[in-house]
């Protein structure tokens, strides 16, 4: 029997990391590295129109630096500072986004075609991470509904599955990130076509930085951040509920719906409050992250059960 | 061999994380969420010192080094000092003195419970770490009381493990270190007992 038959892949990877570490680097572990990667700006996006409906003008936007140096993107590493430090390792060109499954018109998109086909608007959204911090971010993108409509979903399209990139040179992919890859997420079709759901290609009017999920990512602002999958390579419409990475990894900690809900705690910490990055005292977390217009999507559902 | 510089040097080394953190805080190098970074760094320092405190006796058993025992009390006291700073940062800054919220956290979430329990275990050990208390309690009882540090090491390891959404390599590594240090003691205790039985 080959050893790989007996050893789960994650254990094998963990062991390999151990061997790589060696005794010397154990010492280095005691000096956590805090240095922030230098902030790099990308090319400007052409023709971005601010959408006044989503200006969120009474809330202070987080800085470009905050948004690009404090990230959860396990493909690029598990520390908050890893994605910005390893950003250059993600190859975003050429890039293909494939739309398939229960659609009349499946298509493999080139990024340039996407940028040409959809008018890009700026929307300022709150982002609430499951780890109880939040930011206010000016995204540039277009409604997911408009994108999906182009492919003519069939009547059997009840769910939308999202798949993120896997590139062998990424530190999280070749090392040990703890979760399996590719990163997969999913939405119910009515959630996906809700006017708030966005496909994002930019930030602060610039091409989306790699650490924030370049070249194209999902943003669903009333759900915890992990639902908004980054660096998408595949969107699949299907009849059954797709598996999602975190809810498979720890079903008691992360649900399929993952709507922001101050009344349902994470098993390890409270979700009733959050720290807005840049502030000291925590503020109250709002149901659906303040986007209460989505509540009707869940009428009659017990959101304690479907967390 | 007397090494007069050992204790002052260890004292200085244990103080170092404070100016290091203050400098990084002042220069804005703790990142977008400095409170979280501070909380992590203080907890990490306390945990490292706990591991070092637990390493003194195994160093004597395995490496025949006697000098670590001379700084064991110092390491233990500094461990408690950083554990206090860690706890204060959580209570005052992170939670903004929301005592009801903290109580809820401790009762409902084992991650917080484990951290709090570790601190509570360290408290009587720090208070009785002096020679005076050693005499007052009698060495036998003092030693028995201070065995609580083994439990503190175990609880702190699990607190550290639960800090992250997935088990981190460094956490698993540190848990292994704590486990090895405890196993060395256990093996030595068994050996000593069997030697006593043989000689009696």
Image (cartoon, coloured by chain):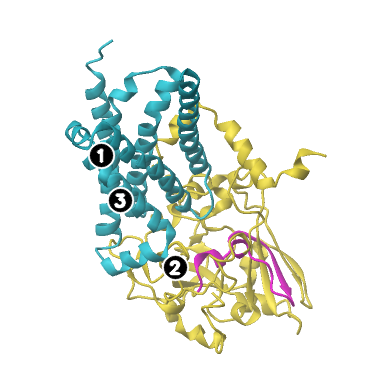
Label at residue A121: none
Count the marks. Answer: 3
Q: Which element is circle 3 on?
A: helix
Give the chain coloured yellow. Answer: A
Look at discs 2 and 1 and give the one toward the viewer.
Answer: 1
Q: Which residue is mark 2?
A: A128
Q: Is residue A15 left or right of residue B172?
A: right
Q: Is residue A69 above or below residue A28?
A: below
Mark 2–mark 3 distance (CA, rounded to whole Å): 33 Å
Q: Which residue is mark 1?
A: B18
Q: Which residue is mark 3?
A: B120
Find out whether residue B69 is within the magenta segment: no
Look at discs 2 and 3 and give the one toward the viewer.
Answer: 3
Residue at the extreme top: B1
Toward which corner of the image does residue B126 lie, by quadrant?
top left
Is A83 or A105 nearer to us in this picture? A83
Image location of residue A211, percent across then percent down: 52, 53
| Residue sitting at x 31%, y 40% | B145
Find out whether residue A239 is within the magenta segment: yes
| Residue sitting at x 37%, y 52% | B115
**Crowding near pointer 2: few (<14 within 10 Å), some, many (20+)?**
many
From this viewpoint, is residue A226 visible? yes
């Amino acid at each position: 029997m080959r050893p790989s038959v007996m050893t789960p892949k994650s254990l094998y990877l963990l062991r390999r990391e151990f061997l790589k570490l060696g005794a010397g680097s154990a010492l280095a572990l005691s000096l956590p590295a805090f240095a922030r990667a230098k902030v790099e700006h990308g090319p400007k996006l052409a023709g971005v129109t601010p959408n006044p409906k989503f200006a969120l003008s009474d809330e202070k936007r987080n800085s470009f630096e905050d948004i690009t140096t404090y990230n959860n993107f396990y493909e690029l590493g598990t520390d908050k500072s890893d994605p910005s430090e390893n950003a250059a390792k993600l190859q975003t060109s050429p890039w293909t986004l494939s739309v398939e499954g229960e659609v009349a018109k499946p298509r493999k998109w080139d990024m340039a075609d996407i940028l040409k086909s959809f008018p890009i608007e700026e929307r300022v959204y709150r982002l609430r991470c499951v780890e109880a911090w939040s930011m206010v971010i000016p995204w540039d993108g277009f409604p997911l509904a408009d994108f999906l409509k182009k492919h003519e979903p069939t009547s059997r399209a009840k769910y939308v599955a999202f798949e993120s990139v896997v590139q062998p040179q990424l530190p999280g992919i070749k090392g040990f990130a703890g979760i399996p890859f590719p990163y997969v997420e999913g939405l119910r079709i009515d959630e996906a076509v809700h006017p708030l759901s966005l496909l994002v290609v930019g930030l602060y009017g610039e091409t989306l930085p790699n650490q924030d999920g370049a070249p194209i990512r999902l943003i669903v602002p009333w759900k915890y951040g992990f639902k908004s999958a980054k660096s998408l390579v595949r969107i699949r419409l299907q009849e059954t509920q797709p598996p999602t990475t975190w809810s498979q990894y720890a079903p008691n900690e992360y649900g399929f719906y993952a709507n922001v809900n101050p009344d349902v705690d994470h098993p390890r910490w409270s979700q009733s409050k959050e720290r807005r990055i840049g502030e000291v005292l925590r503020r109250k977390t709002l149901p659906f992250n303040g986007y209460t217009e989505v509540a009707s999507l869940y009428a009659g559902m017990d959101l304690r059960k479907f967390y | 061999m007397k090494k007069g510089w050992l204790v002052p040097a260890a004292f200085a080394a244990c103080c170092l994380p404070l100016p290091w953190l203050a400098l990084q805080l002042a220069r804005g190098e703790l990142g977008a969420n400095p409170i979280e970074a501070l909380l992590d760094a203080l907890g990490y320092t306390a945990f490292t010192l706990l591991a070092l405190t637990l390493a003194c006796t195994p160093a004597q058993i395995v490496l025949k080094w006697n000098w670590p025992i001379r700084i064991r009390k110092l390491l233990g006291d500094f461990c408690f000092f950083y554990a206090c700073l860690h706890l204060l940062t959580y209570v005052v800054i992170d939670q903004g003195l929301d005592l009801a919220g903290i109580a809820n956290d401790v009762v409902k979430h084992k991650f917080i419970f484990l951290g709090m329990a570790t601190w509570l275990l360290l408290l009587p050990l720090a208070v009785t770490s002096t020679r005076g208390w050693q005499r007052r309690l009698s060495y036998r009882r003092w030693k028995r009381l201070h065995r609580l540090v083994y439990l503190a090491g175990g609880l702190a390891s699990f607190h550290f493990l639960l800090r992250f959404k997935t088990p981190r390599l460094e956490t698993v590594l540190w848990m292994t270190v704590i486990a090895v240090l405890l196993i060395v003691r256990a093996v030595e205790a068994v050996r000593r007992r069997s030697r006593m039985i043989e000689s009696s």
